[in-house]
Image (spheres, rainbow, N blue to C red):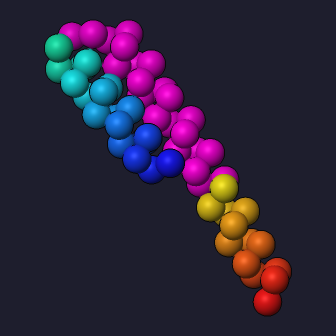
Amino acid sequence: MIRWIVIFLIIALVAAIFGFGGIAEGAAGIAKIIFYIFLILLVISLLSRLFRR
């Protein structure tokens, strides 16, 4: 999942460099959403490990 975040951030940076603001904004937005999903899943995973022990 982190790989997808990095891919969308790279797409956003390249699009911003070439002046495609809409595409850069969209790719950065997608990267943010995936990052937040990753954080939520990480917290759930850590909590489930805590309660198993």
Left or right, residue 49 beside residue 16: right
**Residue furthest bottom in the image:** 53
**Residue furthest right in the image:** 51
For the residue pair 36 and 11, the one nearer the viewer reads as 11
Q: Is residue 16 above or below residue 28?
A: above
Q: How many marks?
A: 0
Q: Is residue 16 above or below residue 13?
A: above
Give the quadrant of residue 10: top left
Q: Position of residue 52 (x, y in %)?
A: 81, 83
Q: Is residue 13 above or below residue 47?
A: above
Left or right, residue 14 beside residue 47: left
> What's the magenta region?
19-40
Which residue corresponds to the image point at 50% horizontal and 48% vertical from the top-left?
Answer: 1
Give the quadrant of residue 33: top right
Q: Position of residue 42 (x, y in %)?
A: 62, 61
For the residue pair 7 and 24, the one nearer the viewer reads as 7
Our reading of the magenta stretch's main secondary structure is helix
Q: Position of residue 15 (x, y in %)?
A: 26, 18
Left or right, residue 11 beside residue 32: left
Image quadrant in which the C terminus is located? bottom right
Left or right, residue 1 beside residue 25: right
Q: Position of residue 27 (x, y in %)?
A: 41, 24
Give the quadrant of residue 48: bottom right
Taking the magenta stretch, the answer to whether it contains residue 24 is yes
Which residue corresponds to the image point at 68% horizontal and 72% vertical from the top-left?
Answer: 46
Which residue corresponds to the image point at 44% horizontal and 40% vertical from the top-left?
Answer: 4
